[in-house]
Amino acid sequence: MSTLEKKGMESEAGLVVIWNKENMSRALRHAPVFTLSEMLRLKKADSLKRMCRTYGIPAYSRMNKAALALALKRHLTTTRVIHGLLHSLDKHEWRFFVKAANVRKLSLETPKSECYGHLLDTGIAGMYHHSNLFHFVVPTEIKKIYKTLESAGLHARKEHCHLLVEYAAAAANLYGAIRIDELVDIFNSQNEPRTDFEEMHYVLSGFADEYYGFFILNEYIVDCCFPGDDVLRLAGEAAKKPRYLPDKRTFLEFADLYYIEDPERLSSLRAYIAGNLSGDPDFAEYLSHEIYRLCRCCSSKQKYVDLLKNHNIRLDRKQFGDFMSLINELCDSIRIWINNGHTQHELRFGCAHACCKTIPLKDSGALRSG
């Protein structure tokens, strides 16, 4: 077994320990129960009060545990409430919920909290540690409501919403900032059923955060790396150039925040950092990705100087020249926000990308940063 394989196994084993520590802190130490009433009875009064506070249930602070459980049961057996909670689940949570809702109990050795945390917090599922396994149960009362919603087309609506979020994440990653109405046009050119501004804005408002890599600023979707002033600069510069638009499959590759279309130049930079600036491969990986992000923003040379200073890296004139040469090569090969997703090479020699279509950018108007 290679050293790299051993390191990977050790890293995975460490994650399992961390995950199961968190799992144990969230699980009820009890055999699985299957009704909402039974699940709520097993929770502590403080936990029930937190849920009541979240749901805005009146007078909960004066209730005893039995009254808290009853109030929550009434709330969580309302179709409107369950529909809203299911709508708020992200793709991973939703698919985990569906899996649990279609069995009596879902039993796992090492579940990941990113898939179930919101389900437990809202009370639409319970988690139990019993017989060395973690068991997830969607209470029968909630299953019944879910099945009704499912027959009314809930699955298709959720997949549509998830696709809208993926398009927003991809657009923010590829373009840096884009008007919502322009994203609507891109989505509608590649998908059926179509969407509109109101639906796009409503759906994205529930998912805009660092996890997905974008936020909403007035009528714009913006990459999380952007401070407000840079959005103004980007919108002005990008308005002068056509927008790069690949086919749907390629476009959605950019929904992965860590996706790099052509990693060769980045690998050269990472190798240079590891061999000349730091012997730590993890630091070389980190620093190369920080530089990649600066390249996407078309940052000034001073930004790279500041980055090196922040990590106490001192370079002589030749080293700095070599370093900037690699950065310039990287910037020339990647998709730049200020170029509306085009590489410098594409704009210099014309778009030769086989799946590329360019669409004119609508008038950016003025962004209000308030």
Image: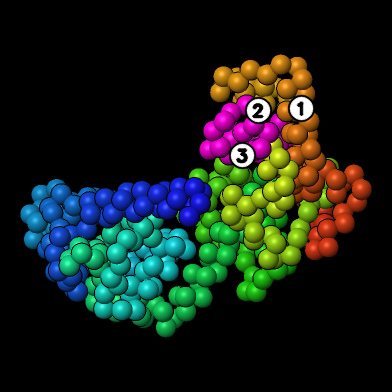
| Residue 180 locus on image (x, y percent) | 64, 53
Residue position marked by numbered label 2 in the rendering: 276
Q: Quadrant of residue 71?
A: bottom left
Secondary structure state at the residue bearing disc 2: helix
Secondary structure state at the residue bearing disc 1: helix
Secondary structure state at the residue bearing disc 3: helix
Query: Which stretch is magenta?
Result: 270-299
Side of 333 relative to 313 (left or right): right
Assess whether mark 1 and mark 2 are in contact (beta carbons under 8 angstroms). Answer: yes
Label 3 and label 2: CA atoms lie apart by: 17 Å
How would you rate the neighbour count of disc 2 (Cα within 10 Å): few for under 14, some for 14-19, many for 20 or more?
Answer: few
| Residue 129 locus on image (x, y percent) | 20, 63
Most distant residue in the front direction: 1
Can residue 126 be spotted in the picture?
no
Mark 3 and mark 1 lie on one chain; the one further toward the N terminus is 3
Q: Amino acid at mark 3?
A: His
Residue position marked by numbered label 1 in the rendering: 322
Residue position marked by numbered label 3 in the rendering: 289
Camera-side residue: 40 or 256? 256
On whether residue 366 falls in the magenta region, the answer is: no
Q: Quadrant of residue 245?
A: bottom right
Q: Residue at x 59, y 35 (%)?
A: 284
